Image (spheres, rainbow, N blue to C red):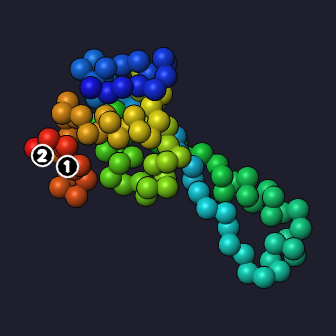
Amino acid sequence: MVQPSRPDTAIAATAFDYAEMGELFTRQHLKPPSAAAGQLAAAGGRAKVRSVHRNAMTYRRFATGAEAIRFAIEDLPAEGLAATVLEIGGSRFHPGEIRNLYDSAAYPLHRPASQRRAHPCGS
């Protein structure tokens, strides 16, 4: 069962609709740019403007929440998932909650063996 951390995401896994449209918001570039010596000084004020664009959010819409969850877990790098929010039906889910939805027995899509977590009970 999914245990949301905030009241606005109070949806149990049994009531969660994986078929509903899902939206992912994530940081486009997560690491600050590495510049060669002197480049930032030569760029002057432009470095600040560039860094704003590098921290821009990326938005993706998926036909189903299950597809959005799959993309977040299987396709985003770990640091990308850490800066991701999933929105489904007006509720927001943060990285740990996204992982819980993916790990849920109710998750409808096939999970590759490399993405499956070992359950504490050994099953």
| Residue 40 in sight here | yes
The relative height of residue 5 versus residue 94 in the rendered view (above or below) is above
The relative height of residue 1 versus residue 86 in the rendered view (above or below) is above
* Numbered label tally: 2
Name the residue rendered at 36%, 25% in the picture.
3
Q: Residues within 10 Å of mark 1 (few under 14, many from 20)?
A: few
> In the image, which is nearer the foreground, mark 1 or mark 2?
2
Assess whether mark 2 and mark 1 are in contact (beta carbons under 8 angstroms): yes
Q: Is residue 58 left or right of residue 117?
A: right
In the foreground, 71 or 103: 103
Name the residue rendered at 88%, 62% in the picture.
45
Q: Tell me which corner region of the image, top left, top right, bottom left or bottom right, holds residue 120.
A: top left
Q: How crowded is mark 2: few (under 14 residues within 10 Å), some or many (20 or more)?
A: few
Q: Tell me which corner region of the image, top left, top right, bottom left or bottom right, holds residue 10.
A: top left
> Mark on residue 80?
none
Q: Position of residue 91 (x, y in %)?
A: 46, 23
In the foreground, 123 or 80: 123
Name the residue rendered at 83%, 63% in the picture.
46
Q: Which residue lies furthest to the front in this view?
A: 121
Q: Where is residue 81 in the image (x, y as percent from the top left)?
A: 45, 49
Q: In this view, does 11 lie to the left or right of 110?
A: right
Q: What residue type is labelled 2?
A: Gly
Q: Mark 1 points at which residue?
A: 118
Q: What residue type is labelled 1?
A: Ala
Q: Is residue 31 left or right of residue 47?
A: left
Q: What element carries label 2?
A: loop
Q: Mark 2 points at which residue?
A: 122
Quadrant of the image containing the C terminus: top left
